[in-house]
Each structure stands twice: as structure tokens, then as C-alpha cells.
Amino acid sequence: MEPLRPYDVALCMLLRSYLCPADEVDPPPHSPLHAAFGEALLAEVRRRDAVACPSLVQLLQHIQEHMCPSGDPLSPEAEYFESVKQAVGHHFDSLASADDLIAFFGSLAEAAITACTSAPSADGGCQGADVNSAMGLQLRMAYARYTAMTFEALCKLLTEVQHYFEAAVAALQGEPQPAPASPALKPVPDLEKLLNCQMEGLGRRLGRAAQQEIEAPLAELEAAAPDLPKTYLARHLSSLHHRDYSASLDYLHRFFDHTVDARLAGAAPAGQDAAAAARERGRLQSAALSLGSMHAQLGHIEEAMQALNETVRIAQQSSDDACLAHALASLCQILDATTPGTITSVTQTPGASPAARHFSQLGQLLHRCLKRSEELQLPHLVAFARLALARFQLLHPHQPAAAAADGAAGSNGSGSSGSAGQPCGSSLAVAEALRDVRHLNLATRLAAAAPPGPAPGGTSASARVLRGVGDLFTSTALLFGKSMQGMQASSAAEVEHLAGGAHLLQAAAWELRGSRHLTQAHALACLEAYGGTARAEEQCTALVQLATSVAAQHGYAAAEALLAAADERFPRAQSRVLAAARLAIAHDRALHRRDLHAAMHLASQMAALASPTDSVDIMLRLEAEERIARTLAAAGRTEEAVAAAHKLFAMASTTGQPLHSTRLLLLLARVQREAGAPMTALPYALSCANHAQQLAADLLAAEAAVEVALLWCDMGGAAHAQRAQRELEAALPTVLAHGSQELQARAQLALAEALMAQHDTPASLAVDAEWAGGLLEEAERLYQRLEDRQQAAHCAYLRALLADALGAHSQRDGHAATFAALQQPAD
């Protein structure tokens, strides 16, 4: 146990003066400022942001700053603080020998510790400190450390206390002081608490503060306590978050170098050989698993797989099931982030494509990870597997049969696997995963906060909680497995992070289904309900979902205002998700403005965000290349755009990205239609509509329906126009309720053109003239809000033709003037 320091003695003096004032020199307990004195002491007890113990002058300054914020030397607070200083000086003067120090702690135990009560005494005398209060714990810990000291250590403490007081007196009198040899550090448990707070808040501070500001207290602690291993772990995490590979690897090696069991280097006692060897195996397992996780986060797939294989080898030798379960979860993360075909260790299924083999193995491993996590009672891995399975079903609803069969056999009744065959099963899986993880979050928080007690007889109740069944208050005692002893709080914190991330997955699912309002609701839930615990990257993702939705519904100005708010919240963000969203919104705006040079530059910047290797970031690369193809099509370079889209479609199909493949089919249809080849474009549009329906991507299916209707209109003839009208009327409710401004404008323009194409005389056109005119007016307004002057001019041109056919010459001239104005460059 750590010995007492002079700072601890000074704090005990102050606490005793507050809790049990016995001498006349102590501050008056009946003063109205006595409560402020207690608040200042409580703040000092809870102070965790200092590495070294403060001097007596610094300690008194802390209390003065809390009690006298105005700094007025004539205020009642300043007068009361003078009595506090006089009491401290009197108590330090009275410590002349070791017997005085022993008498002080004896009176401290009798008055402030053993006489503690939470109820006021009848005579208003000494009340002591409640045993579970912060002050009570501080006093009890100090007394326990005092009782563990030898007499020689007590004499040394007395000398240090006297020097501590003399240095304060000399400083207050203005006498020069020699520089201290080294700062007196706080006890190791306090330093570890400080490091735990730093590591816990690290993910939330990213983007808000500079790396130097984040690492300054860690560097100070490293210089003061170079033998404290957690210092290097905290610096490793900080370097990893800032993608500093060399520093991250160096600090990871230092951390595990400082955790070597010293007894392995020499001769250990006979009964401790096995225990020391077991700890060493655990250290090696943790080192290999941490190394693999670091490489995976940085995109080093081969290195991550090597470290993971080493982890599995060591864990199998020691029969560590919990470590194997974590390694399995890490493998799932690596496979999920890796482009199919780039890992050679994937199971070779005869006749299957690389993507099919990759996702077949990923599905099987996720189901196995969920099953093993439930068996071993690892709540954080259960939550991870639930969400990963839901995401897998959302992106790959038609998963290989092998994965589905394995999941049906090994899910143990999990709700996420039972809905795979139903219509919109992936949406149900995401909703069930969100519900289960939120329930698990509450259960783990209760279980981690509960005091340890005797284990109940059975484990069926805790198994039901892990599987999402609402048997909450009778089963939390057995929620954590044997391997989680001492780590319940960290597991509960990780489940809470995953619960916040579950809202992001649900928001993405609603965006795919076309419900932007629900997308915004879940993104806001992540920011507001979990903003205090969510990591910076998760908050950036939620802001991206909001910005994308706002841009589609309210235009680019609103999206830019939201991104500006994100910049204020994270002024130093290095999030690629946020950067890609900003570039995507700017690229859409540039295309609508026909600023093709800027559009190509923005698309190229997005492509540069992806990793230069082909092993990761395939989705970002596909989106960037798709935007380059759209820019080529807008520039009239049809052949190049078609070739780029065909190449991307092949890449998306080979790597198993069905949603990207479907969007590329729609792009090919648009490029061919704008090139004047509607018959060539029609198969692409029909195929896109079919695939979107199979993926339950309702908004993409509505876009394909609008494209098909435009193609029927381009073919000419009343019959084709009527068919286009039917297509549009079927898709119009989804478009108007959930579609973006661009989709709404395109659909209303297409419906107006279909209505006008069905009439060949002014008399027949008059029947639908009001309807068509309203559609064109709304489409023109939307295109102007989108800053697309070319399409707005086309709407004005059609309105002029409609008015001319009906003989409304004044309206015709007004629309013609609008058309001419829109043809001119914008100011």
C-alpha cells in the first residue's frame, strides 16, 4: 500500500476541522460560510486532474479560489478563509514529534471516522463523515495507509510534513525557495484513476481539441512516472486515434514491456510458477490482440491477420475461451472492413465467387460470435454481434445459404436471424437489434452498479437477457461471465457505446427505406441521448446523416449551416466520414450549377480520401468513382461516362456491393437517355427497379420508376405517354412524401411532360392544362432552390409552350422572359 504523503496529512487536517471542529482555532461550524468550506474540500477530494501532490500553498489556493471567487480581501468569505489558514498553521505547529502525529490520527479515527453518521446529532456536535461519502472514503483510505506504515516510515513522514509546512511559511513570507528535486506524485491508484478518466474521455475529445492539448497531461505523467504502464497505453490510444502509426506501435510495445511479471525473470516461489506463467500467457494474448486491432483500424489487413493468428494460437494453448471469442469478433471486424478477394485465408467454396466466399464466411462467423458470446456471458460482444449481424443483413439481404443455415442452427432463438426470410427482413433485424442492445445497455449498467453478492442458482434468466428477452430485474446478477470479474464497468461502458451506435444503424436503415424524418430522429437520438458517452466519430456520423437528409429536403444552404455547426462542435475533426459528406454535398451543388471543373475537382478529392490500396474503403472508392462518371456525363462525354460506369458496375458486382450495383444501373440508364438512346437505356432502368425492389430500397425504386417514365416519354406517342403517367402516379406518393427536392422536381416535370404528350390539339390539352401547369410551376421552383438554372429554364420553356397553346399570350410572354433570364449566367 502506498505510504502517506504530507499532502494527505494536510487534507486530513482540513477535513477534521470541517467535520469535527474541536479547538477554538478551527473555523466556526455555525457560520453560514461553513457549507462553502465543505464544498471546497469536497472539490479538492474529487480533484483528479493533477499528477503531483500540490504544495500547502497550492492546496490553500484551491480552497480560496472555490470559497472566494470574487477575490475581495474584505469580504466575509476572505475573513472565514483566514480562520481556515490559521487553523492549518496551528495543527501543523502542534506536530513536533512522532507521538503528536500518532495522536492526530488517533483523534481522527475517533472523531471523524468511527463517530460518523448520516443523521444530525441531537446536540449539534461532531457528526463525522458518512462511510460511503467522498470525504468518508478519503479519511478511511488515509487511515488505512497510516496503519500500514512502520514506525520508521512514520518518522520519515513527520520530517516530510515539517518540511512541507516550512516551505509554505517561507513562500508566504517571500523567502527564496530551492528548486524541488522531483514532484511528489500522487499514489498509484489515484494516478490510474486519472489515466482511466483520460482514456475514457479520449474518444469524445477527438476533433474538439488539438492532439498536443490532448496529450499534454499524458506527456507530463510519462515524464513524472515512467514506470507506470497505463501511461503508455493512454498515449498508444491517442496516437492510434490520430492515425500516427509509428508512435502508436512504439507506445503499445512500451506498455506491454512494462507489464512483464518480474518473477518470471528470476526464481519464483514453487507455488507461484503456474500463476505467473498464466499471467504471462494472458499478457501475450492481450498484446497480440491489441496489435491486430491497431493494424485493423489503420487498414493494414495482412498485419492484422498475422497478429490475430498469433492470438488464436496462444489462446488455444491456454484454453482461454474469452480471448478466443474476442479474437473471433476482431476477425469479423476485419472481414467486414476488407474488400472481398484480398484475404487468401477465406474458405474456398467450389464454384463460388470471391465475394460469395467472403460474405458466406463473414455470415457464419458473426452467427458463431453471437452464440459463443451468449454462452460465455460477454455482454459487450453480444451487443457487437447483434449489431454486426443486423448491418450484414441490411447490406446483404440475400446472404449465401450457408450463412443463413448456420445462423438458423446456432442463433438459439435470436430475433435477428429469424426475420431473414420475411419481406423487409433486414429492416426488422435492425429494429430488433436496436431494441435488444438498448435493453442490454440498461441491464449491464444495473449489473455493473450492483454490489457483489452470492450468485443465484441458475443461469437461464441471464441467458434470456443476453438474447433480448425482457427478464431484466431478476437476472442481472449473472449477466457477466466468470472471465468478466473486475471488468463489468468497462463492459457496460462498451455496451453503452454500442447502444448509441445502434441508432446510427437504424438511421441508415430508414434512409435506405426512404423515411428521412425517422432518419433524422435516430441521428438526433444518438447526439442527444448518447452525446455524453458517444465517441467523436459516432457523433460525426450522426451529423453526416443529418446533413445529407437536410440537403435533400431543404437545400444546400441548410446543409451548409448544419456543417458549419459541426465545425464549431468539432473544430479539429479528422473524420473521413465528415469530409466525404462535405465533398458529396458540394459536388451535387456544383453539378446543379453546371460548374463541371469544380465538380470534377471535388470528386477527385473524395477519391483521394480512400486508401491507396484495394483492400479497404471499397464503398468510398465506388462512390467517388461514381461521382466522376456523373461529372463526365454532365460534361457530354458520354462514351467515357458509360465506360466508367460499366467498369464500376463490374467492380461493385465482383466485390459484393448490391446497393452500389443497383445505383450504377440507374446511372447507366440516365447517361444513355441523355445521350438520346432511350431503347438502350430502358433495360438498365427496368433492371434497376427490379433490384431495388429486391433490396427493399424504396427510394431507389422510386427513382428508377421516374427514370422509366422519362424513357417512355422520350419514345414518343400517346400510348407511351399514358404508360409513363401510370408509372409516375404509382411512384408519386413515395416521391412526394420522402423524396429529395431533386427527385420531386424530376418526377413532377416528367408527369407534366407525359400529360402534355397525350394531347395533340389545344382543345384536348385544356383538360389537363391546369394540372400540368401546376406541376411545371412546382418543378421550376424546386429546381431554382437547387440552383439548377438549366432545368428551371426547361420548365419555364414548357410553361410558355403550354400558355401559347391555350392562347394565354401574356402568360406566355412572362414565362418566355423567365426562360431568357434563366439562360443567362447567374450573378
Image (spheres, rainbow, N blue to C red):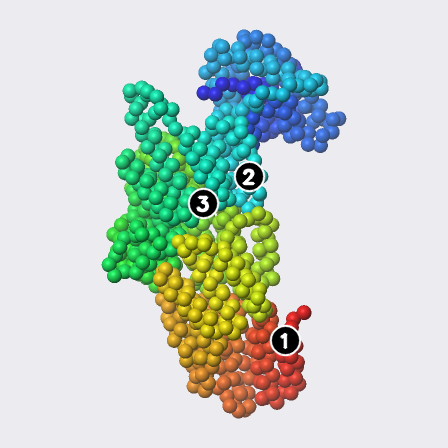
Disc 3 is placed on an element classified as: helix
Q: Amino acid at mark 3?
A: His
Mark 1–mark 3 Cα distance, whole angstroms, equals: 50 Å
Q: Which residue is under mark 3?
A: 497
Q: At 47% across and 41% down in the image, what residue appears?
A: 246
Nearer the N terminus, badge 2 or badge 1?
2
Residue 738 visible to the viewer: no
Out of 386 and 712, give the one closest to the viewer.
712
Q: Say left or right for 389 vs 667.
A: left
Mark 3–mark 2 Cα distance, whole angstroms, equals: 21 Å
Q: Residue 608, image x and y in percent?
A: 50, 56
Q: Residue 333, image x and y in percent?
A: 38, 49
Front: mark 3 or 2: 2
Front: mark 1 or 3: 1
Local packing at callout 3 (Cα closer than 10 Å; few below 14, some 14-19, many 20+) is many
Q: Residue 381, image x and y in percent?
A: 36, 44
Q: Which residue is under mark 2?
A: 214
The label on residue 822 is 1
Q: At 34% across and 52% down in the image, what residue appears?
A: 343
Q: Residue furthest right?
A: 74
- Quadrant housing residue 28: top right
**Residue 304 sits above or below residue 603 on the image:** above
**Residue 456 sits above or below residue 693 on the image:** above
Q: Quadrant of the N terminus?
A: top left
How many numbered callouts? 3
Q: Amino acid at mark 1?
A: Leu
Disc 2 is placed on an element classified as: helix
Nearer the N terminus, badge 3 or badge 2?
2
Q: Amino acid at mark 2?
A: Ile
